[in-house]
Image: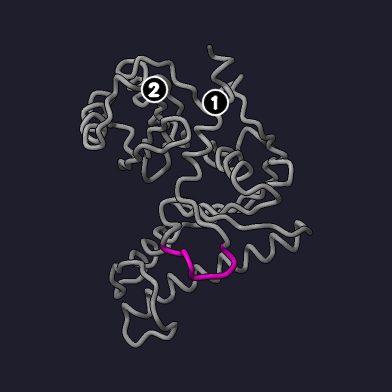
Amino acid sequence: MLLAINANNTNTVFSVWDGEALKGAWRAATDARRTADEYVVWLDHLLGLEGLARRDLDGVIVASVVPEANFNLLTLCRRYCNSEPLLVGEPGVVLGAKALVDRPEEVGADRLVNTVAAHDRFKGPLVVVDFGTATTFDVVDKDGNYCGGVIAPGINLSLTALHMAAAKLPSVTIQRTDRVIGKHTVACMQSGLFWGYIGLVEGLVTRIKQEFGAPMAVVATGGLAPLFNGATAVIEHTDPNLTLWGLRLIYERNRNQRT
């Protein structure tokens, strides 16, 4: 079985794949101070809850946008999973997609992994909207190459900035409101956050499609993607596990080479 790890700015997701079957996925707050010893205690417990065991793992792949966390994650793989991890972005790692941008080395590992997964699952030109700490819009051409995109503040960052910058505004939960016009402060804030963000997504996707000049499907992923499911016709597909699927694909493409 394969252990696929996706380390993002807010959360790190650990998943276990048995072929094409996702056996389990778990989130931990990303913290560069967390040691390999701490990770393994946490991971063993969660694997056990699903009837899985670390001894059954025979491969590991890691994608990370948090370099400070890499040492302990890679140590976990080497010391406790008895595997030399495949790290997305390292020289020699075959992705199956090109980054057709001015500075390919600056493209985050998660965006490249999403590109690979989205092309495999949905084909055609695509916009991949990843709702995370930042909300990213990634353009994938018909051949499955990454063609650039947009980076916007994530909805949680918007909430934090609003709460911190305005003395009389409370911290609220982010949720879809039935009405756009709020009748009290909390409802006004929730409407502004949710429907304002829907407006951002709709506006950016419309402009991306106009600039790209061809029909494009839109796929949503990321930890917050389910929050927006069904809220706008712009988003045609929602796949919260898209990045994990891409990690599995990349590992399979590189397995023979590593062997």
Q: What segment is highlighted magenta in the picture?
A: 227-235
Residue 205 place in picture, x, y as percent: 63, 62
Q: Is residue 55 above or below residue 128?
A: above
Q: Residue at x 40, y 19 (%)?
A: 58
How are the colours assigned in the image?
Answer: one colour
Residue appearing at x 36%, y 61% in the figure: 160
Q: How many marks?
A: 2
Instruction: Identify the residue under disc 2.
Output: 74
Vertical arrangement, residue 150 with respect to residue 259, above or below: below
Considering the numbered disc 1 on the image, is that residue within a helix, a strand or a loop? helix
Secondary structure predominantly adopted by residues drawn in magenta:
loop
Under circle 2, the secondary element is: helix
Which sits in the foreground, 216 or 188?
Answer: 216
| Magenta stretch: includes residue 231 | yes
Residue 101 figure quarter? top right
**Residue at the image position 53 percent from the left and 37 percent from the top:** 246
Callout 1: few (<14), some (14-19), or many (20+) C-alpha neighbours within 10 Å? some
Select label 1 or label 2 by which is in front: 1
In which quarter of the view is residue 164 placed? bottom left
Spot the residue most to the top: 259
Tag 1 and tag 2, C-beta contact below 8 Å: no
Give me the residue at 68% from left, 37% from top: 99
Q: Which residue is mark 1?
A: 252
Residue 215 is left or right of residue 39, and the answer is right
Q: CA distance from mark 1 to mark 2?
A: 19 Å
Instruction: Of the two numbered discs 1 and 2 on the same chain, state the one appearing first in sequence.
Output: 2
Q: Residue furthest right?
A: 213
Q: Is 96 covered by the magenta stretch?
A: no
Residue 82 image point, x, y percent: 35, 14
Residue 219, above or below 112: below
